Image (cartoon, grey):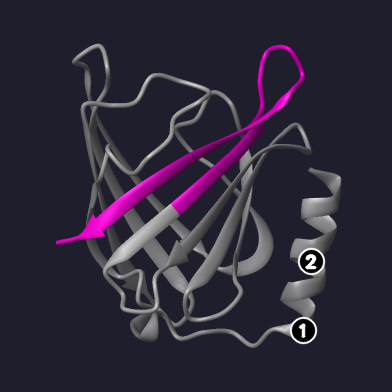
Amino acid sequence: MRRTTILLLAILTASVGLQAQDNPIMGTWTLNLSKSKYVSEPPPRSRTLKFEPIGSNGLKLINDAVLANGEKTHVEEEFLQDGKEHPLHGSANADTHVNVQFDAYTSQTINRKDGKAVQALKRIVSQDGRMLTIIVSRTNANGQPVDDVRVFDKL
């Protein structure tokens, strides 16, 4: 995680902000379970993500899911892609996050708990704008790094 954080800050320093309205991640995405790989947790029955622009470098994420056990969840989060640490609300596993837009198709969020990186989410939109891949990296209960690959199709 330390290397990821250092790389994240280095790229941020070298990058230029991307206008939110030009960001191809904007819109509604539905989870494609057949293309996804869940290692750290059971896959949900369904998940829909909706990204909306806020200002010049902010995003609103609306995340609706039906978990493996049938429980429905609805989470809304707003964040700035400015490389600065901001409070994260509604998560027991993290209290802050840092969000960076690397280029038009790639962004990353690092979630932290008590100042320590606990999860990284790298989002990559395909060049044709029809597929979103989110790689969720974290450490499991045994201290081993695991990556979930979540693939979404644009509606």
Q: How many neighbours does mark 1 have within 10 angstroms: few (below 14), some (14-19), or many (20 or more)?
A: few
Q: SS of the residue at dot 1?
A: helix
**Residue 64 shown left or right of residue 85 in the figure:** left
Residue in the picture at 77% in, 19% down = 143
Closer to the camera, 86 or 24? 24
The answer to the question of whether label 2 and label 1 lie on touching residues, with beta carbons closer than 8 A, is no
Q: Which residue is mark 1?
A: 14
**Residue 78 shown left or right of residue 118 in the figure:** left
Q: Which mark is residue 35?
A: none
CA distance for labels 2 and 1: 9 Å
Q: How many neighbours does mark 2 have within 10 angstroms: few (below 14), some (14-19), or many (20 or more)?
A: some
Residue in the picture at 29% in, 26% down = 44
| Dominant secondary-structure state across the stretch colored magenta | strand
Split into 4 quadrants, where in the image is the C terminus? bottom left
Q: Is residue 52 above or below residue 141?
A: below
Magenta residues span 134-155
**Residue 90 shown left or right of residue 95 in the figure:** left
Q: SS of the residue at dot 2?
A: helix
Amino acid tagged 2: Leu
Q: Which mark is residue 9?
A: 2
Amino acid tagged 1: Ala
Q: Is residue 135 above or below residue 145?
A: below
Residue in the picture at 37% in, 86% down = 22
Split into 4 quadrants, where in the image is the N terminus? top right
Q: Earlier in the sequence, mark 2 or mark 1?
A: 2
**Residue 135: within the magenta?**
yes
Residue 21 sits in quarter: bottom left
Percent position of residue 92, x then y: 54, 23
**Residue 6 shown left or right of residue 84 in the figure:** right
Percent position of residue 74, x then y: 25, 35
Percent position of residue 31, x then y: 26, 44
